[in-house]
Image: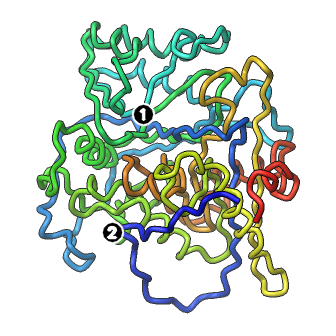
Amino acid sequence: MTEEIPYKQLPGQQQPRPSQSRAPVFVCAVLLLGVTAGLLTTMAVLTLLTTPPEHQTTPPEHRTSPSLVQEEPPCTDPCRLVLLESIPEGVTFNSSSTHMSIFQAWQNLMSEASSSLDIASFYWTLTNTDTGTHEASAAQGEAVLQNLADLSPKLNVRIAVNTPQGSLPADLQLLSSKGAQIRTCQHGLEIAHTGEGAGGRGVQLQLSGRRPGEDLRGVLVPGTEPEYSPTWPSSFSTSFNQDSPLQLRLNDSEASVYLSSSPPSLCASGRTSDLQAILGVIQDAQSFVYIAVMNYLPTMEFSHPKNTQPVMFPFLRSLASLQDPRGKLDVQVRLFVVPATAAQKEIPFARVNHNKYMVTDKVAYIGTSNWSGDYFVNTAGVALVVQQPPQSETGATVQEQLRRVFERDWNSDYSSPLSHHPDAKDKCPV
């Protein structure tokens, strides 16, 4: 038996909202976890690159409650949102096609940048030199690095990265020498991250639009401040949140959008925390909840790092045990295993499922945090929450696109029930 990790109440937990009269909710909670030898912990990916206009905000005193939020006119800017995917080498799907690759989208976005480029990331391993490997797939990461090096003398390139152990990575030293501004942060920023083509897989978003871009800057900038501030200036505040999302036309359809962030100490006035957003999305679902995450650990993970992975499986089995067809409670748990050759297993933090998203019949939630207590309390992250009405003609809402991705993975050969993994039981008997 593993040593028990004491449960700690997470700060900033949302209070239950008044119950609403509605049909019974049939929830299918799914956890697709990338499994490697040792179940390596890695960070999720979320790409949000926008035009950087001057940020204008409403005074924070108008954002204390929905009734006090100042009315904002609907956004008329043309906004586009595209799902991106990183599919590892050797992983193929027979049922449906994949989306544009993250690598190609990043290259396209960088080629279109005209004045500035802001990146927030946890760590950088773009080259074979970084990982100590000799993978041909590193060509994608090396191309990204070269593109950034070419842009650094020409544009205002700013990079926020988690404080490294030891010296600054060679990638960032190169970019700094070319003119990029590098700032290290104590919080583990997880907003933009890429790796080698043979590495993990994940879903990202590419979101373009002026108003969403303004609000995203309000999330990014506090994480790059040199000193922590218990009270953030009003310039970082937002009037767009869970209770008053931004109304705009997204992909030629009406949409409600807001950005959440973590930890609470980096949430300026009006900002919904990641944990509150997740709980709200689940509570508002009426027919299904599909969840794809790398790690699920409802406790404080890094206080007992040696026990992190063994204790995860009892939590997963506790979810699976809730399955009750007679009570119309449908809770299923599967593991998504990314296959790896002997050489690919040598790539650090690779061959895993990086996804951190959730989709319901109403909402698409794509974030950067593993579902572990520490990620909501001590680690910087951001999530995008999108709700669109059904489109009978095209079915092209964000939540519909994400649902198709989830079901493709769920029904693939790489996904299997938790009961098919006896090694998990051996490591952590109940």
Does 312 appear above or below 6? above
**Residue 14, image x and y in percent?**
40, 74
- Nearest the eye: 232 or 301: 301
Element class at badge 2? loop
Query: How far apart in space, not on screen, are marks 1 and 2 (Cα)?
Result: 30 Å
Q: Residue at x 33, y 52 (%)?
A: 76
- Nearest the eye: 342 or 410: 342
Q: Do the residues labelled 1 and 2 touch (CB within 8 Å)?
A: no
- Nearest the eye: 409 or 35: 35
Element class at badge 1? loop
Q: Which of marks 1 and 2 is nearer the N terminus?
A: 1
Residue labelled with disc 1 = 122
Query: Dot 1: few (<14), some (14–19), or many (≥20) neighbours within 10 Å?
Result: many
Q: Residue at x 23, y 80 (%)?
A: 67
Q: Is residue 176 left or right of residue 296?
A: left
Name the residue at the bottom extreme. Answer: 21
Q: Residue at x 53, y 75 (%)?
A: 284
Residue labelled with disc 2 = 244
- The amino acid at mark 2 is Ser
What label does residue 131 carry, if any? Answer: none
**Residue 366, image x and y in percent?**
52, 51
Q: Is residue 96 left or right of residue 73?
A: right
Does 315 appear above or below 186? below
Does 215 appear above or below 254? above
Instruction: Give the quadrant of residue 207.
Output: top left
The quarter of the image holding the N terminus is bottom right
Instruction: Give the quadrant of residue 389.
Output: bottom right
**Residue 411, image x and y in percent?**
83, 51
